[in-house]
Amino acid sequence: MANVRFYSGDTVPLEMHKVRIVQKLNFMPIERRLEAMREAGNNTFLLRNRDIFLDMLTDSGTNAMSDNQLAAMIQADDSYAGSETFYKLDNKIKEIFGKQFFLPAHQGRACEHILAQTFVKPGSIVPMNYHFTTTKSHIVLKGGKVEEILIDEGLNVNSEHPFKGNIDIDKLKALIQEHGTDKIAFVRLEAGTNLIGGQPFSLENMIEVRKVCDEYGLMIILDASLLADNLYFIKQREEKCKNMSIREITRAMSDLSDIIYFSARKLGCARGGGMCLNSKKLYLKIRELVPLYEGFLTYGGMSVREIEAIAVGLEETMDEDMINQGPQFIAYMTEELKKRGVPVVTPPGGLGCHLNAMEFVNHIPQQQYPAGALGAALFIVSGIRGMERGTISEQRDENGNETFANMELLRLALPRRVFTLSQVKYAVDRISWLYQNRSLIGGLTFVDEPKILRFFFGILTTVNDWQDKLVAKFKEDFGDSL
Ligand SMILES: *Cc1c(COP(=O)(O)O)cnc(C)c1O
């Protein structure tokens, strides 16, 4: 994004790219959207693309690629072992992160699987700023326990805190004293903390965490899937880093980490993932599992074309004009909604704009999944697909009781360089209308509830006929308009 002042005095995010390949969108009438939502069991994951207008489900594997990425893909060197393409990425990782060893995996959760297999034992504790769905599932599957030691402000939906993803250092020390270092598998830091609204942590906080980990001999594993946003916010919001380049900040974060893993579906705008580190001993240990679960060490379950795209994408991530597009569009959308009184998570983070369902539909009890209900309602009235990040995304406890989420969010992801500003304005308009008519939104209940990661496949139904009433009101206000 360019920092261009408009004569009108407005602040408008200005794209620093032009569109050269386009995909036609479908825009279905509201009757079809209602039908599609019902067919999908009120679960936005089960919708089909043909029924969706703006897909704001996720930024995973949906970011726009650059001309240079596409060009590199054509040159990929395909072979089971020893592909030159792999060494291109391996070198890029060395150059950017300064880590000697790189292990590929097919996506972010595959790294989590391998790292949990390697380091988590029954009874292990894994302290972290905040969990991510797949991370927690892999740790729990191995008999470990996640301990969230985020600063209290992190769970405050509306805040001025620039780094809501920071770790509370006192909580970290207390946890270590309570359990002893032997029980702690590693400390996990998640860049661009996903489930609390794409919120960053500061470099200063990371330095503090490192000090504690050094004191107790603990390892830091950095989940760098959303690193691009975190880098941008460190440069924007952290006084001491204002004059550092994105490359220098990346290197500083890397130097504070023992192991870095990432989903290249997000970081690098391609598809794939990997882990990098400097310890040969740990590398050899982790390496054993890669051919078993992912594939040979020079592809790790990825297509060589995607590996080429990641190498170029990582380089492009070092360009501030590139990584600021997501956060600036998100900030625009968040501010516009705020002006209209819509409850959103503030300050704006990365990844997407997050609606605060707990307040948006405060008449829906948590047992009836307010964020899920809001997601279903928004799709029906707009064709926009969001993702529930609330209680449906949690897992029941050992006794089968609901684990109520700390926050009930509807995440509207803005995949990088994909949407135009008029599409964002459309989203703002329909969300504002829905907010005016929020009393018409009702709750959801499970019809079919899977045990693990239920948000992916769960089937839900409405507690009454609220969706018909919502459609009737929409038609009253918008007539024949889509
Ligand atoms: C998406 C994500 C993952 C998992 O990556 P996948 O490639 O989707 O498996 C892990 N951690 C964070 C923070 C993520 O956002």
Image (tube, grey):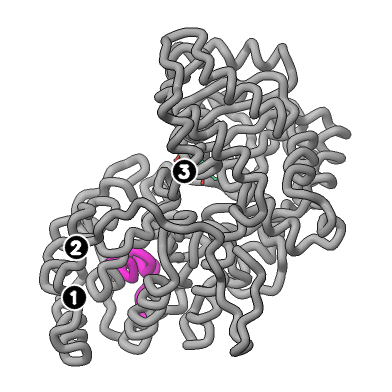
Q: Quick one: SS at disc 2?
A: helix
Look at the numbered discs 1 and 2 and tell me whether their residues touch, using CB distance below 8 Å: yes
Q: Amino acid at mark 3?
A: Asp
Looking at the rendered image, the quarter that the C terminus falls into is bottom left
The image shows residue 235, relative to residue 143, as above or below, that is below
Q: Is residue 198 magenta?
A: no
- Rendered location of residue 221, percent (x, y): 67, 34
Q: What residue is shown at x 67% (from left), y 61% (from top)?
A: 164
User: Which residue, given by chain and number where applicable, does mark 3 sit on?
Assistant: 67
- Rendered location of residue 98, percent (x, y): 75, 28
Query: Residue 37 shows which numbered tag?
Result: 2
Instruction: Tell me how far mark 1 sits from mark 2, CA to CA.
Output: 10 Å
Q: Quick one: SS at disc 1?
A: helix
Q: Amino acid at mark 2?
A: Met
N-terminal of the pair, mark 1 or mark 3, is 3
Judge by depth and name the residue closer to the eye, 238 or 460: 238
- Rendered location of residue 77, percent (x, y): 45, 17
Q: What residue is shown at x 38% (from left), y 60% (from top)?
A: 56
On the question of residue 163 being in view, the answer is: yes
User: Which residue, given by chain and number where applicable, does mark 1 sit on?
Assistant: 467
Secondary structure character of the magenta stretch overall:
helix
The image shows residue 313, relative to residue 42, as above or below, that is above
Q: Is residue 366 magenta?
A: yes
Give the extent of the magenta segment: 363-376
172 sits left or right of 407 in the view: right
